[in-house]
Image: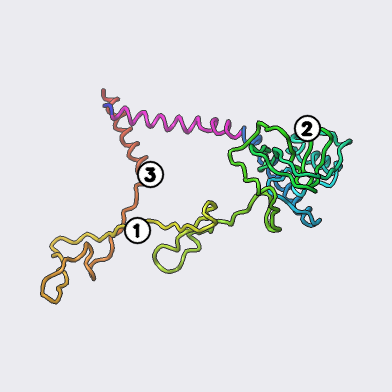
Amino acid sequence: MSAVAAFFAVGLSAVALRHFSPSLFHAAQAADPSRQQAEASRTHLALANQAEEEFHRQAGRRVYPYSVVPGGVEDARELKWVAEHDPIVAVHYAGFDYDHARIVRLVLARTVYLSYRIGGHVYWTRRRVTLHPGEKLITDGKKTARARCGNRVEEVPQQATSGSEPPAWKFDEPLPNFEGTAMQEPAVPFQSALNRAPTPGPGAPLSLYNPFTGGSLIPLSPPPLPAVCAPGKKGDKEPDGDSDDTGKKKKSGPCATGGGSPGTVPEPGTWLLVASGLGGLYWQARRKLARA
């Protein structure tokens, strides 16, 4: 009787889920527009940064990694224009006096704490970075930044640091022409059932790009499947093994050579059979309850 009650409860749960699930999915879809808007804004910002990098490369400027302003700025007017079109730069330069800012050239080397940008976030170094003589800086008298990359400098450590801080020499190494501030990775090879090899057997194994081992390729292949032999008919004798030169018979494997074909794997049960079984149990339970 308890088994009948359990199946009856499963049937009621399935009916309830079918009727009440649309409201749950509707609530999840209601939050999708805001999420899509955030994703669209992030994508637009990334495309704008790429366009700015390409413009600066065509203008002959060097682009340094982790730049707040890829390609840097020539004067305060250009920095103001970038801040008006890039919200990350606008927040980082909040309170900057563009009207009284000027470009200066560093006479002596000095060590400072440097800001750097990773995607849509700006962090500060935990260790001091060296600024070299002759380097251009833009300053309004209170806030100072590197003109070549827009990364601000401070004499005292700042709170917004990152555990994945790049080494100091990375800030002084300009990017090649085919790279951007976000390093590109090669695409993973795609393999589908539509482009398998015509020969029988599994196709070539997939490969994944591993960025932590210098870009090496790691082959991925499935484990070998166990052999499946067709069941023998009743009355059939076991095939004798081959005999060697001494006349002794060698043991044959689970599938004799020249024997039957490999067995077929049975198809898994379908939801139709499961539903039919549950329906039959429910009908029997209903009849028993009616008789009682």
Q: Can you tell which quarter of the image residue 137 is in?
A: top right
Q: Is residue 70 above or below residue 288?
A: below
- Quarter of the figure that contains the N terminus: top left
Q: What's the distance in space between the residues labelled 1 and 2, CA to CA?
A: 61 Å
Expressed as whole percent of the image width and height from the top left, the position of residue 223 reads: 36, 56
Which numbered dot is residue 103? none
Q: Farthest residue toward the top?
A: 292
* Label 1 CA crowd tier, 10 Å (few <14, some 14–19, many 20+): few
- The residue pinned by badge 2 equals 94
Question: Which residue is labeled 3 in the image?
Answer: 272
Position of 268 relative to 16 (above/below): below
Most extreme residue toward the bottom is 245
The type of residue carrying mark 2 is Ala
Question: In the image, 29: left or right of 138?
Answer: left
Of residue 42 and residue 257, the one placed in the foreground of this image is: 42
Q: Earlier in the sequence, mark 1 or mark 3?
A: 1
Which residue range is magenta in the image?
A: 3-29
Q: Is residue 249 magenta?
A: no
